[in-house]
Image (tube, rainbow, N blue to C red):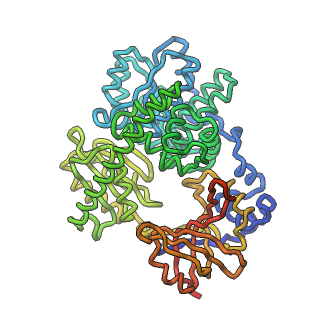
Amino acid sequence: MISKWNYQPLTHQQKQEAESLLGRCGGMPAIAELLVRRGVSTPEEADAFFAPSISDLHDPFLMPDMDKAVNRLNRAMGAKERIMIYGDYDVDGTTAVALVYKYLQNYYSNVEYYIPTRDDEGYGISLKSIDYAAENDVKLIIVLDCGIKAIEEIEYAKKKGIDFIICDHHVPDETLPDAVAILNPKMPGSTYPCPYLSGCGVGFKFMQAFALSNGLGNHNELESLLDLVAVSIAADIVPIVGENRVMAYHGLRRLNSNPNLGLRSIIRLCKLTNKDITISEVIFKIGPRINASGRMQSGMEAVDLLVCRDLHEAFEKGKDIDQYNRDRKELDKKITEEANALIEKNVGIVNGKRSIVIYNKDWHKGIIGIVASRLTELYYKPAVVLTLSNGLATGSSRSVQGFDIYAAVNSARDLLENFGGHTYAVGLSLKEENIPEFSRRFEKYVADNIQPNQLEPHIDIDSEIEFADITPELVSLLKKFNPFGPGNQKPVFCTKNVFDFGTSKLVGRNLEHIKLELEDNSTSHVINAIAFNMSKYFEHIHSHKPIDICYTIEQSKRAGTPDTIQLMIRDIRPSKN
């Protein structure tokens, strides 16, 4: 059982807003409540929420430096300069590079792309890449999903006559690189309406501005690349609100109807062809395969796949990346087991601590971010996992809901060689001898700043309803809340005083799950549900004692059978009355 269920009834003002929305919600109060909780307060906003329009995208020139970036790109193309598109080796970086490269190739051929290797060059702009650019007469580098802290590297490039346009979305420092233009919605003083763009999203806005400045009216050319933006939004776990929601919505439509050939090959390998691909499928199936290229081999292979123009070639490249993903899974399992064994052997790593910092010089650098995520999920504490790479302890950190791990890492920045990231995920490197002091100061910052409720799992409940409210009409309207993700999570409902109809049973190889048939006093209809890994509640349920449940509402589809409504149980507890 999750110890805390959070449900805050609507305020008086929110109730008034919900009342005004009922006409857009089929008269269903639960749908109106969901809209209000997502910041929708007027019927017009409800219309825009249910049907996101491309016309709702913001003017890209609202982003600081956009005019400078477009002018420099136009000048480079006019002078026939060689342009390099450079990006990080993760999903966000490789999709961003693929998007900008594919779009510019429609109008300009003297362009190439470059992805640094994780092991040899590391995160960000490498000196090796700048030397390569200089040797190949590159005059302009467009860098995506990194670069906001590359002060020394860009100074080095300037001496070689190379200009930079930085397209990043990571938190900037007070001192910025001396680039021609920095496109970043998180820049100090920026009033850009959507500060949570992915790196690929920033690249899309740059290409949107380039198209506008040159009067390029074929909007489908640009909009056809939104499948790449949707993949980046899902994989980088940025909030799916505002402009991000518009791009994710239309990107998913493209992903389901006519994705680019590289993504089509991955969809086929994931066995998702002719299935409804959601953000969840991108996070758990498509994204990890693209990521596996940069983790196990080279992110260049991911870009090669995403810009591929031949379906057979794309499928062959996709098979290689699929194998990298299988290798990644095996390594991930091995290192996670080693990390847990290390913690069990040295309980002081977690006992009495508000955070976890763990180090093993032999762990694979490409996997430690995944391991940090696993430790955070298991122990519900901010976690840093470090390994040795090129003489430095290099690591990834992950956070729990609501805690800013970037600020925690920043508190010990004088001990670090490099770091960068977001509120919930940060990459860092430091000298091996600094690990003990970093661990001490990181723990102190977390202990001083984390709230007790952030150290225990909890469920935020959107609405309390009865089974009589669960109708096909409700389920139909819930579909319009897609795409789901941070800022717009799948709605969680709560129903109290629920009973077993008498037919619930244990299922699974070890009888660890419960297949439920439930009823309450509001209707005679029996509701199907599934509760994974909750067999400990079976005796209580089977004895016909009342329970409270929180859940999401799903619609199961099986060939040849009508769609059925099923509750996906998130938690169960005995009713208090």
- Which residue corresponds to the image point at 33% horizontal and 50% vertical from the top-left? 332
The image quadrant where one finds the C terminus is bottom right
Observer able to see residue 211 = yes
Q: Is residue 275 above or below residue 225?
A: below
Query: Measured from the top left, where is residue 340 in percent x and y?
Result: 28, 61
Left or right: 483 in relation to 506: right
Which residue is pictured at 37% across the width and 28% down the height? 154
On the picture, is 413 further left or further right than 452? left
At horizontal 58% and vertical 49% (from top left) the residue drawn is: 278
Q: Nearer the viewer, residue 202 or 482?
A: 482
**On screen, residue 301 above or below 327:** above
State the residue in front, 576 or 333.
333
**Between 69 and 299, the one nearer to me in the picture:** 299
**Farthest-out residue, bottom:** 577
Residue farthest left in this picture: 433
Quadrant in the picture for residue 191: top right
Q: Quadrant of residue 474?
A: bottom right
Residue 312 lies, in percent from the top left, at 50, 28
